[in-house]
Amino acid sequence: MAKTGLRKREEVRKEDTWAIEDLYEKDEDWERDYQKLEQEIPKLRAFAGRLGESAGTLLAMRKESDALHMLAENVYVYAGQRLHENTDNGHYQNLADRAQGLLVRLSEAEAYIEPEILGLPEGTVERFLEENEELQVYRQYFENMIRQREHVLDREREELLAAVGELAESPKDIFTMFNNADLRFPEITGEDGRPVEVTHGRYTALLQSRDRRVRKEAFTALYETYGRYRNTLAAAYRANVKQAVFYGKTRKYRSDLEAALDGSHIPTEVYDNLIRAVHEYLPQMHRYVELRRRLLRVETLHMYDLYVPMVEDDGQKISFEQAKEMVLEGLAPMGSEYLELLKEGFSSRWIDVYENQGKRSGAYSWGAYGTHPYVLLNYQENLNSVFTLAHEMGHALHSWYSDQNQPYIYAGYRIFVAEVASTCNEALLIRHLIGKAEDPGRKAYLINYFLEQFRTTLFRQTMFAEFEKITHGMAERGETLTADRLCEIYYGLNREYFGETICVDREIELEWARIPHFYTPFYVYQYATGFSAAIALSERILKEGDCAVAQYRDFLKGGSSGYPLDLLRTAGVDMEQKAPIENALRIFTQYLDEMERLAGNDEI
């Protein structure tokens, strides 16, 4: 159902919409490329069984694959973005479905490539690389593939694993359908005295209510509902852990953690260093929890008190024009080149700004190689929306730099570094705003915002990562993951992370049951490492200026032309060490000190 009071898509000013015509001027142009792609996909199959013939044949296959993927990306992105403008539009629902189907057919057509290359006699690809200069551009692609050769099985067993891949997705599919389609939460009484249904979308807003009764009722309603299905959800989680363990063992990894990290060539020590470093700073998190209790003026802090701002917002409305100026000012340390690109994005309609009837919720940066990036917003004239603008433009400029400096095969960057550029922008902006804030209340509100980023991203996601490591390790040892055991582990971690000055309500033991990312094993740690890297990079930029900015731009230009850890080292951050995480946690402590000072002086 469309939200009342929202404009229809056709009523939105052109200036406030993205320049989708830069991808395709009209649907007929999209249809032409769709038909072309449909006709040319079979060309890729013609190389099957021939990749060991010569360097020229291998190069021709890669060029054909790149060309088809670039065309497919245009087709897919255009259809998807047109649908996101108004998800009720049946015409674009059809285009998006057709584009998705074509991507599946392309994937099927090239399924032979990796097994066939890895099945070539040892040294063949290396010899081809030396023989053909044009093939050199693909060296990183081939070396990364060959690096994982020992974990690739023979063709028959690979085909069997591929065939059961859909079954392996079943736990995730079951959880997704249950959580999003079947699960219903009760109504509570809202701040205005009227009934309001608790939903996934409303839950965070309800926990941010100034009315403590509303927070408690929402918290209780949510977890009592999950509690009724605890055994079902434990079975789904257990099955997902088991499939990860199975694939890890089958592919001859020492653990499913190692298997999950190896795709990006990340040592498991990076994961362990994160957990160890955060544990060393848990006393600072406990200080933060106690400060929150004092500022909220409650005798005992509860888990449902963690999301409400410690300091009230002044309610200042920020227009989109003001937001752009704030972002430009905050990112001034990035230098004139970066700022000019930001201005180009602002003035050349890279951004779809406001909500309209049927528009996809949330925000993202997307686009296709060969055109500028696009950013979807649902701008709301508040500080959160300003930070969302800075965040998504960080992604957009990362993509722009990468596309401009890398061939197609390396233009996309890996998940491990995906949040670095966006979070670095946010870190620069918040520190600029805190620095210029003269009113103690405003400064405290901004510091609260920054501290919450640390709590929810660095501390909380690390707690999630530790929960995954414990439970997956249990499964690898043959221990049973019952609902009671999962709740016991999760409750204990909350006690450890949040300390003794908060009442760790028993309901929170079920939080594991509602985290979708647990169904992509060992994914969440990357939020914490990416945040730490971004804080370290922003610190370098502020302290060292042009030299640090130049190195950071080199990182942005890198795409996936190197392994994530190597690319981050070009910017001056070594995530194999604890130092970047410890540096981020020291900054958390510094701002916690400042917040305590403001509170101690009764300035807030």
Image: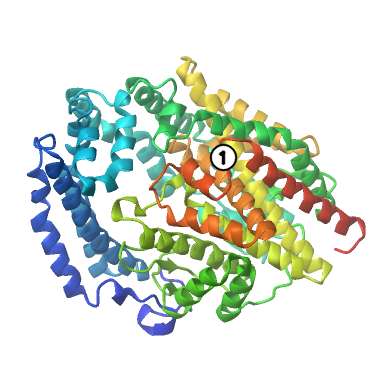
Please give the name of the residue rendered at 34% of the width and 30% of the height, measured from the top-left corner.
147
**In the rendered view, would you say 151 is above or below 114?**
above
Residue receiving disc 1? 575
- The residue shown at (20%, 47%) is 62
Q: Quadrant of residue 1?
A: bottom left
x and y percentages locating residue 479 in the rendered image:
49, 16
Classify mark 1: helix, strand or loop: loop
Which residue is at the front of the view, 221 or 448? 448
Image-based side of 403 in relation to 110, left or right: right
Q: Which residue is found at the position 32% from the left and 21% from the top?
A: 250
**Image point (22%, 25%), residue name:** 122
Toward the viewer: 479 or 472? Answer: 472
Percent from the top left, x then y, of residue 117?
A: 20, 33
Q: Residue furthest top?
A: 478
Q: In the rendered structure, which amino acid carries the disc numbered 1?
A: Met
Q: In the rendered image of this protein, does residue 284 appear above or below residue 160?
A: below
